[in-house]
Each structure stands twice: as structure tokens, then as C-alpha cells.
Amino acid sequence: MSKNWWKILGVALLLYTFTAGFLVKVPYLGNLYESIRNFYFHVPMWFGQITLFTISLVYSIIYLSTQNLKHDIYAMEFAKTGIVFGLLGLTTGAIWATYTWGEPWSNDPKQIAAAIALLIYLAYIVLRGSITDLDKKARISAVYNIFAYFIYIPLIMILPRMVQSLHPGGMEGSKGGGNPALGGDSLDKSMRLVFWLAVTGWVILGIWITSLKIRLNLLKDKNIINE
Amino acid sequence: MTKTVFALLKKDLLLELRQQHTFYGILLYVASTIFVLYLAINKPEADVWNGLFWVIQLFVCVNAVAKSFLQEGRGRMLYFYSITSPVNFIIAKLIYNIILMLLMSVLSLLLFVILLKDPVSNMPQFIGIVCLGGISLSLVFTLMAAIAAKAQQNAALMAILGFPLIIPQLLLLIRLSKTAFGEIFRQNAVMQISLLLIGLDLMVIVLAVILFPFLWKE
């Protein structure tokens, strides 16, 4: 029980998000009105994706130094959950866009960058599928994972801020890009109450899902991995 | 270390000069593709010209770099493994592919200008951007070719791995080349984008040098 405290914390935080997220008073910015509540679902998806991909990167680096297949499984599962979070982020973004931008997909730079990030990590899965030898698969996919991460970060953080975009954080005319999360410092007090707890809750959920998949994989490959 | 790098580079260049099969193969590919384009769309406008140019560059790079890695047989790789360090090997490959890609970029630019007419207003600037683009493309695809060579030597896999990774740089290059067509950019934008591209290239080089030794041991 004491080992699972964080899972209970995650569930509690998410329950809080689902209730408080819809009850707390929100500021009306621009044409967002009540849809700004999506902020508690859409943005944590991306925080979650970055966190999961970072953890995947760390395990890839650890694998390259220890050659223990367990770490390779960790890296793979974190990347897969990161992909799922990315899909959810794009979906929640598309739902939000239908009401605010007029259409679910408007080829906005941020949307395109997020889709390309997804393609990069899907290629990671394809690469893993194309190699049969376990050690080789782990080593080569670890190399690709590390390289992909360093392209992924500029792609989703730097490029969308350099161009004009409907998404907050893009440039307006000649002004520089700001924070794509509607201004971190200027986030309304009432939203801040729910937002950071929501982020923590969603990230914990992501890690929980990944840990379950890891345990499943470790059981499946029990014979090959010496712990 | 530089002596080893130069020796390996000289080997690749000599092989190329004697066999010439990669060079003429890619040249033929470039010429036929641009000719097909010419037949399809006789005199494109600036945007289309720009877009087509960079797409052609992408495919030329995939073919050029694929050949350089995939033509080494297993026995040859084992021989290299015993005589040189992976860092020297990858640096030599990177430099060789840069030279090859620069050559191909300039040639394809020439063909584009001859066949598809010339909407470029600032040609020296565009040539600089093309060279920068050629270098960026070849660096990423060299590492991808190294990865694909270990995974059953599949050229299609190299394309699958490489295309998503190259898109950020490709988008930056397409945006940057618009300045050579006379589009006005805000202050410092050209310098900012160029520095970002150069920064990404340096990062790719460092990553390639750090990561290749892990691919090296079989």
C-alpha cells in the first residue's frame, strides 16, 4: 500500500480536476468563454508527453551504458505512452479548435509540429519492429530515441514560437512569440488553482499506465532478462 | 586523428572518382526528375518553384546518402572496425556526404534554373541557402543511413526514419529561401533562422559523433 501512494494521489488529483475544473469560475478571454476549461485537459497532455519522452530518453541513455534489456523496455513503453498522450493532445486541441478557430484542423504550425512529433516517435516503433535480434534492436532504437528527442524539443518548443499562428504563443505581426500556455505568469489565480494539480494528476496517470505496461512486458520476457 | 579522417575521406573520394557509379547515378536521378518536372509544369511561379526545389533536394539526398553507406559490405565494415575508431569513421562519412550533397545541390540548382526558369531575385543569397540546406540534409541522413545499415540494410527504412526528423529543418529552409525571392522579412529574421539552422546542424554533428560508436559494435 505504501508503494502505491502515488497512484492514489494521481486518482485524487484527477477527480479533483474533473470536478473543480467544471465548477471553478473561469475568466472569459477573447472568444473562448467556457471552452477555456479545456485548458485543464489539453495542456497537461503536452506536459505529460514531454515528461514521458524525457523519461524515455533517460532510460535509453541508461540502456546504452548498462546494456540491461530491462531499461530498453522502460524506454519503449514510456515512448508509447507519450505517443498516446500526443494523440489525445491533438484530439483535445481539435475539439477546442472546432469552437474557437472554426475548424478542427487548420494546418496551424503548432498542430503540424505536434503531428510531426508523433510521426517521429511512430518511426521509432517501426524501427523497433524491423529488427529481430533483441540486443541489436535495443541498441539501435536507443540511438534513434536519443537523436529523435533532440529534434523533437526544437520542433515543438522553438519553431511554433517563431511563426504566426492561431495558437497562443505564435508571433503576431512582428512581435516575438510568448508562452503557448496562455501566459504562465499571467495565468488567472482561479485557473492556477486547478491547472498545476491537473498537470500533476495527468502525468501521474501517464506514468501509472506505463508502469503497468512495463510490468506486463517484463513478465512476458522473463526468460531473457536477468534482473 | 585528422590524418585518419583524411585517409578515410581520401578512400571514399578515390573510390568515387574511379567507379563514379554513385555520382553518375545520382546525376541521372537529378536530371530525370527535373526533366519530368519540366514536362509537367513548364514555368512554375516562385512559391511552387521553391517548394519543388526543396522536395527534389530531399529525395536526392536520400538516394545519395543511402548509396554511400549501403555499398559497404559486411566484410569491409569488419575490416574498418579493426583498423580505425568509430569517431574517425563517422566524421569521414559526414564530410564525404557533405561534399557529395553540396555538389548535387549546386547541380540541381543549375538544372532548375535552366529548365524551369529563374524566379530568384537574389541568386548569391539563394546559393548560400542551398549550400546550408545541402549540409543540413546530408548530416541528418548520414546518421539515419548508419542506423538503417545496421537494421538489415533497408533503404526504405532510412526514408521512414529520416523524413519526420528532417521536416523541422526543411520547413526552416523553405521559409528562409523565401527571402531570396524578394519577400520582406522582419528585422533579424534571416539571421535568426540561419543561426537556428546552423545550431541544429552542430547539434546533429555532436549527436552523430557521440552516438555512432554505439552503432559501430556489432
Image (cartoon, helix red, strand yellow):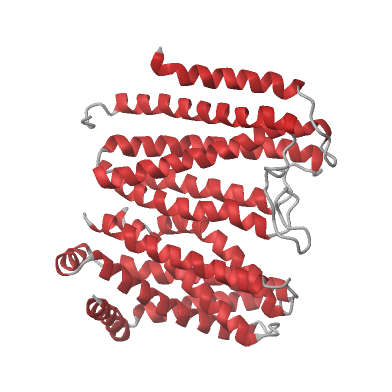
Of the pair B184 and A119, the residue shown nearer to us: B184
Snapshot quadrant of residue B122: bottom right
Q: Measured from the top left, where is residue A77 in percent x and y?
A: 42, 34
A180 over A10 or under it: above or below = below
Left or right, A89 with respect to A97, comes to left
Residue A33 visible in the snapshot: yes
Q: Measured from the top left, where is residue B27 in percent x and y?
A: 46, 80
B131 over A213 or under it: above or below = below
Of the pair A50 and B7, the residue shown nearer to us: A50
Outermost residue to the top:
A1
Snapshot quadrant of residue B8: bottom left
Q: Residue at x 33, y 57 (%)?
A: B211
Of the pair B90 and A46, the residue shown nearer to us: A46
Q: Residue at x 49, y 34 (%)?
A: A81
Of the pair B74 and A214, the residue shown nearer to us: A214
Snapshot quadrant of residue B69: bottom left
Left or right, B122 with respect to A121, comes to right
Left or right, A83 with respect to B93, comes to right
* Number of marks in picture: 0
Q: Measured from the top left, where is residue A27 in percent x and y?
A: 81, 33
Residue B71 visible in the snapshot: no
